[in-house]
Each structure stands twice: as C-alpha cells, then as structure tokens.
Image (cartoon, rainbow, N blue to C red):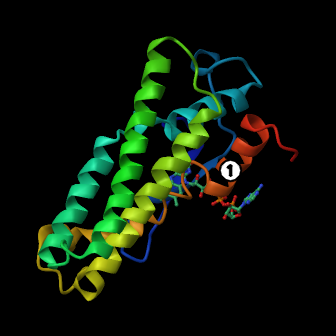
C-alpha cells in the first residue's frame, strides 16, 4: 500500500464514517520479493484468502452465544421472557447457535488433522451470516421503538447499530447467493 502509484480514496458514508475506499493502482511496480505464490496465479491466492475469511476460525461461536445472551437480556428487559411465542423463537435461534458451535468444532478438528477445508467454508459462511442477521432481526422486532432513541438498557442501545451491520453479513465475504452456488456446484455436483 506504500508503493508509488497506490492511492486510496475514502468513501464517506451517510453516518460520516469512511469504512470503505476506492483503491487506484497507477503504473504500480511490485518487486519480485513481494510476490505471493507464482506469477499469474493470483486467483488461487485470492480464493484461499476468501476461504479463510468465510471459515469458522474467523467467526468463533462464542460471538453468537454472546449475542443470544443479549437477546435474552432484551426479552427480560421488555418483560416478554415468559411469553411462550418469544421463548419458541429464541429457542430456535439457540438451537442454531449450538449447531454452529458444533460445526466450528468439526472444522477445527479437521484443521488440527492437517486437512484443508476448501468449499466447506461456504457452508460455514452461510451458517454464521444468516444466524447473525436473524438474531438481530428478531432483537429489533422485540425492541420495536425501544431500539435506538427510546432504548432503556445498554444492550438495546447497541442493537440498532449492530442490526444494520448484521444486514451486511450476508453480503461481505461473498453473498449468500454466491455461497449457495458454490455449495450447489462444487459440493453437491449440481449443474451450473
Ligand atoms: C460491510 C462490507 C464490508 C466489506 N468489506 C470488504 C473488504 O474488506 N474487502 C473487499 O475486497 N470487499 C469488501 N466488501 C465487498 C464485498 O465482498 C462485496 O460487496 C460482495 O462480495 C458482493 O459483491 P458486489 O457488491 O460486487 O455485488 P454483486 O456481485 O454486484 O451482486 C449483486 C447481487 O447479485 C447477486 N449475484 C451476483 N452474482 C450472482 C450469481 N452468479 N448468481 C446469483 N446471484 C448473484 C448477489 O448475490 C447480490 O445479491 C465489503 C462489503 C460490505 C457490505
């Protein structure tokens, strides 16, 4: 990024932050000593990098266990924790968090054995990103107007912001449609 000809132009979002940038490469020369892998084989490197981003070590299950605890705190604070409909919904999410936890243990066991994960990273990504989206979506439905401006607990106060960021989970690291395509073609062997 410090080479001559590399220019990052920040993209300012509606909230005033600049989380993204346009990066321009103008006649940039990369020394051979900084090559990763073989010349003209960058796509393989990019694919490996994406697999790391999608896979379990990047998304520990503890993160979703924490989110679930916060969801329960919100249900208690809103005095709906004893409502069977709420318990049913949160129970369903808890089952998915546990499924994801067991899935990550299987992945870590495979990595420990020296196996590569490959296309299974897409299954992992689908599991965590859709779980994250659904936890926060349900949190918002529990909170209604109490998410954000009317919030009365620290968990509620941060739910609004995290709900919006969770919307991006099924986009970054490759969208759910792309992950489903990979699962269909490369794991299930379905036609393109
Ligand atoms: C919060 C956030 C952080 C990000 N961080 C980074 C980062 O750090 N580094 C980085 O390089 N990128 C980053 N990205 C970019 C991200 O990887 C892309 O936005 C994402 O891969 C989708 O690509 P796209 O935006 O070009 O959408 P497009 O590819 O234009 O897709 C648009 C829509 O069409 C669908 N679609 C596209 N192709 C197909 C297909 N073949 N079959 C079915 N449906 C299809 C997609 O699912 C999507 O719904 C980030 C994005 C977000 C939102």
- Residue 20 lies left or right of residue 4; in this view the side is left
For the residue labelled by badge 1, is the local secondary structure a helix, a strand or a loop? helix
- Residue 175 lies left or right of residue 15; in this view the side is right
- Residue 45 lies left or right of residue 171; in this view the side is right
User: Compared with residue 53, is residue 66 higher up or lower down, i.e. above or below?
Assistant: below
Q: Which residue is mark 1?
A: 180
- Residue 32 lies left or right of residue 151; in this view the side is right
Q: Give residue 125's position: percent from left, percent from top.
A: 53, 45
Residue drawn at the location 26% of the way across and 80% of the way down:
143
Residue drawn at the location 50% of the way across and 36% of the way down:
55
Quadrant position of ligand 1: bottom right
The residue closer to the viewer here, 156 or 41, is: 156
The residue closer to the viewer here, 76 or 43, is: 76
Q: Give residue 136's position: percent from left, percent from top.
A: 36, 67
Residue drawn at the location 58% of the way across and 26% of the way down:
117
Q: Residue furthest front?
A: 84
């Amino acid at each position: 990024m410090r080479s001559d000809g590399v220019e990052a132009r920040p993209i300012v979002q509606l909230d005033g932050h600049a989380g993204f940038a346009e990066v321009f490469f103008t006649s940039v020369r990369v020394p051979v000593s900084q090559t990763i892998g073989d010349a003209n084989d960058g796509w393989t490197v990019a694919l490996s990098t994406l697999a790391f981003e999608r896979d379990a070590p990047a998304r520990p299950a503890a993160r979703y266990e924490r989110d679930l605890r916060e969801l329960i705190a919100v249900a208690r604070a809103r005095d709906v924790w004893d409502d069977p409909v709420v318990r049913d919904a949160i129970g369903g999410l808890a089952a998915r968090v546990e499924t994801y936890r067991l899935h990550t243990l299987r992945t870590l066991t495979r990595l420990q054995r020296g196996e590569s994960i490959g296309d299974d990273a897409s299954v992992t990504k689908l599991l965590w990103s859709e779980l994250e989206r659904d936890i926060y979506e349900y949190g918002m439905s529990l909170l209604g107007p109490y998410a954000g401006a009317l919030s009365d607990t620290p968990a509620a106060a941060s739910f609004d912001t995290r709900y919006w960021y969770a919307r991006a989970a099924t986009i970054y690291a490759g969208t759910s449609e792309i992950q489903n395509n990979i699962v269909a073609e490369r794991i299930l062997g379905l036609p393109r």
